[in-house]
Image (tube, rainbow, N blue to C red):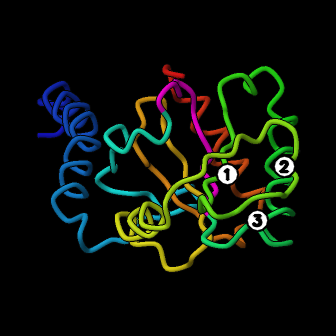
Amino acid sequence: MWHKHKALWMLLLIAGLSALPFVAAKWVYTHRSQYHFTTTNHGKLIIPVKPLAKAKLFPNSHQWTFVYASANCCPKACQSRLYELQQMHKILRKDAKRVENVLLVNKACKGFHLPDRIRQVQVEPVSLSELHQVTEASSKAQLYVMDPKQNLIMSYQANQSITDIYLDLKHLLKGSQIG
């Protein structure tokens, strides 16, 4: 019997093997809640993105922006983080023009030195606390990534490794057509 219908069995085998990836993909998609797939990002994705355009904190920003929000007047840990962001900006080379670093501080803060390539934006204390509430941030000093359309898309804890942040930024810039 096998020899008589060899061509038919071969056709069924090829069709079955061709359909197998589609069936497997459909099964994984419908049962995805049972699996815990890992991501490659190191920061916390903000889903859905939070638009900041209405806040008018960054009126002319059309770049990817790292926003370091500090409730205090940029203590020593903040100064160290700003220096790391400045160094990361240098490592980006050709993509450096696509990224801006911003320090968001209370209006009462004055008289501290900022490293090169760091822009300071002073806001009311209410704006800082609203920013942390909107993003459900757990700490008072937080680093956010804002896309060129002024949406907060990712957040990092203040003590997150600068290497992790750099890897995420490199991945974002590689996949992005904007900014």
Is 176 positioned to the left or the right of 8 in the image? right
Q: Earlier in the sequence, mark 1 or mark 2?
A: 1
Mark 1 residue crowding within 10 angstroms, few (<14) / some (14–19) / many (20+): many
For the residue marked with disc 2, what is the amino acid? Leu
Which mark is nearer the camera, 2 or 3?
2
> For residue 135, which quarter of the picture?
bottom left
Q: Earlier in the sequence, mark 3 or mark 1?
A: 1
For the residue marked with disc 3, what is the amino acid? Ser
Rendering coords of residue 4 (x, y %): 12, 29
For the residue marked with disc 1, what is the amino acid? Leu
Rendering coords of residue 38 (x, y %): 48, 64
Q: Earlier in the sequence, mark 2 or mark 3?
A: 2
Rendered residue at 72%/68% (across/down)? 73
Tag of residue 114: 2
Residue 29 on the magenta span: no
User: Secondary structure beneath disc 2?
Assistant: loop
Quarter of the picture holding the C terminus: top right
Is 7 positioned to the left or the right of 64 in the image? left
| Foreground pick, 132 / 73 | 73
Rendering coords of residue 147 (x, y %): 48, 36
Is 17 positioned to the left or the right of 118 in the image? left
Alpha carbon separation for disc pair 1 and 2: 9 Å
User: Secondary structure beneath disc 1?
Assistant: strand
Q: Which residue is mark 1?
A: 103
Q: Which residue is the extreme one toward the bottom?
A: 138
Tag of residue 161: 3
